[in-house]
Image (cartoon, helix red, strand yellow):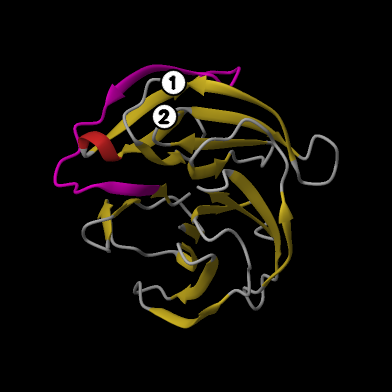
């Protein structure tokens, strides 16, 4: 799931049991596009009106892993990064901002992935954070575009010991990270320091969740 927004409005969490968006905050106003990765190995696109109504829905044409779980866009909205659960990897695609169609999809590089479930880029699109589930249960941080090609490199662990972590999001100024936790029906938040490491992680005390599998904050 990726919501392209003109300003920060909401936190949205996707449940596995109830296939809907569970959103906290004001009404979904100010959004202009929604991209959804599909488990069957593709991605869908929709325009979003000021009332939150979807239109012009269609397949983006992306051909990715049969277990593509999450997606994010760079700051310009012209490159998509898709987290693949198995085989664990990240796919990078060019995005046509006018039509929403994807092209030139290929492996984004990076290393050490294991059961990738969520991905988010920082505001400058210089770092990617990938959350992993099952035996891994960690967050990896990768440099983006260090070699001028938009690929991932220099991946390291920044958080471990999670409980079936499934989704990841950053707030508007990238000072806090939010991680949806499938194993405890909860959301964890951590501070993000100047070195882009995580610290002071706590439970947000979110309630009413049922097997959360994704999270996004519109920025």
Residue 194 in the image: state x and y as whole percent. Answer: 58, 18
In the figure, is residue 148 to the left or right of 61? right
Along the line of sight, the residue nearer the viewer: 26 or 104: 104
Q: Is residue 75 visible?
A: no
Do the numbered discs 1 and 2 sit on residues whose CB atoms are within 8 Å? Answer: yes
**Who's the residue at 20% across and 38% down the image?**
206
Instruction: Name the residue carrying label 1.
Output: 160
Instruction: Name the residue carrying label 2.
Output: 137
Question: Under tag 2, what secondary structure?
Answer: loop
**Who's the residue at 43% across and 32% down the image?**
177
Residue situated furthest bottom in the rendering: 56
Quarter location, residue 50: bottom left
Residue 34 in the image: above or below residue 55: above
In the figure, is residue 57 to the left or right of 99? left
Within the magenta stretch, is there residue 197?
yes
**Who's the residue at 25% across and 31% down the image?**
204
Q: Is residue 28 visible?
A: yes
Report crowding for label 2: few under 14, some 14 to 19, many 20 or more residues within 10 A (C-alpha): many
Which quarter of the figure is the N terminus placed in?
Answer: bottom left
Within the magenta stretch, is there residue 187?
no
Residue 9 in the image: state x and y as whole percent. Answer: 38, 53
**Who's the residue at 28% across and 47% down the image?**
212
Along the line of sight, the residue nearer the viewer: 87 or 217: 87
Question: Under tag 1, what secondary structure?
Answer: loop
Along the line of sight, the residue nearer the viewer: 183 or 52: 183
Comes first in the chain, label 1 or label 2: 2
The part of the chain drawn in magenta is 193-215
């Amino acid at each position: 799931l990726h919501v392209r927004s003109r300003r920060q409005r909401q936190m949205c969490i996707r449940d596995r049991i109830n296939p809907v968006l569970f959103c906290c905050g004001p009404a979904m106003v100010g959004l202009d596009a929604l991209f959804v990765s599909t488990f069957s190995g593709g991605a869908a696109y929709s325009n979003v009106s000021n009332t939150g109504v979807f239109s012009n829905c269609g397949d983006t044409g992306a051909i990715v892993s049969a277990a593509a779980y999450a997606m994010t866009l760079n700051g310009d909205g012209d490159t998509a990064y898709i987290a693949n659960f198995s085989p664990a990897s990240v796919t990078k695609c060019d995005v046509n901002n006018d039509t929403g169609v994807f092209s030139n999809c290929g492996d984004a590089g990076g290393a050490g992935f294991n059961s990738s479930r969520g991905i988010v880029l920082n505001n400058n699109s210089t770092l990617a954070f990938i959350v992993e589930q099952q035996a891994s249960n960690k967050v990896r941080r990768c440099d983006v575009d260090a070699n001028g090609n938009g690929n991932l490199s220099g991946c390291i662990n920044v958080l471990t010991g999670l409980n079936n972590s499934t989704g990841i999001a950053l707030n508007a100024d990238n000072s806090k990270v939010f991680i949806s936790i499938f194993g405890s029906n909860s959301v964890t938040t951590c501070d993000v320091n100047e070195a882009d490491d995580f610290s002071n992680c706590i439970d947000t005390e979110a309630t009413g969740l049922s097997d959360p599998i994704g999270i996004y904050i519109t920025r």
